[in-house]
Image (cartoon, grey):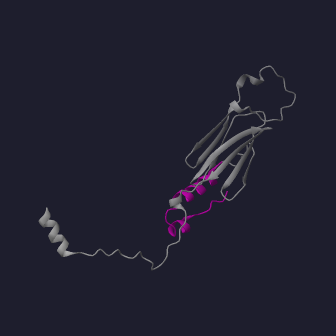
Amino acid sequence: MTRFDFTPYRRNTVGFDRLFELLENNGRVAQNENYPPFNIERTGENDYKVTVAVAGFKSDEIEITAQQNLLIVAGQKDADSNDNRDFLHMGIASRNFERKFQLADHIHVTDADLADGLLTITLVREVPEELKPRKINIGSQPAATVIEYDADAKKKDSKAA
């Protein structure tokens, strides 16, 4: 496997260490990590949907954990659910799994639904108002407020006190 060297990019960027570590770590992940299959789609400008094929799993056998910048979908089959069956062919995979998805900053899970063997997780990007881009005008500093100083009024105030 060819490894990509990010050194030239690291020396010309500031604050992207987490991104480069993520890219390097994903390159080291085992290539046969393809169960269960999944789709990631963009449904709007700030809306995303992750669909995971979890045929044979019930909703109580699936656990979804959302941490900061990480979504973990895990399936744990009951060991005793297939005890009384004698399979001639077992083509539907029912093994335990854990699938991790790295999330960008400010992406939150809003909903999860299981229907027809597909687990659908809805995500939305909610960027705080103070982090949204804003236009900075050049040379338009706010005018200084001028407060007139009245020396005679100051003398009157100090005599009254």
Residue 136 x %, y %: 50, 73
Return the x and y of residue 13 as percentages of the image width and height: 51, 67
Quarter residue 74 falls in: top right
What x and y, as percent, mark residue 59?
A: 71, 33
The answer to if 18 sits in the magenta stretch is yes
Q: What stretch is highlighted in magenta?
A: 1-29
Q: Residue at x 65, y 49 (%)?
A: 123
Q: Nearer the viewer, residue 32 or 152?
A: 152
Which residue corresponds to the image point at 60% horizontal and 48% vertical from the top-left? Answer: 108
- Outermost residue on the top side: it is 84
Relative to 69, is 161 above or below?
below
Which residue is nearer to you in this view: 153 or 53?
153
For the point 17% across and 75% down, which residue is it? 152
Relative placement, left or right, of 46 versus 36 is left
Q: Residue at x 67, y 43 (%)?
A: 111
Q: Is residue 142 left or right of residue 56?
A: left
Q: Position of residue 116 (x, y in %)?
A: 80, 38
Compare residues 40 and 30 and report the one nearer the observer.
40
Of residue 3 and residue 72, the one placed in the foreground of this image is 72
Based on the picture, tell me whether residue 31 belongs to the magenta stretch: no
Instruction: Report which quarter residue 56 is drawn in.
Output: top right
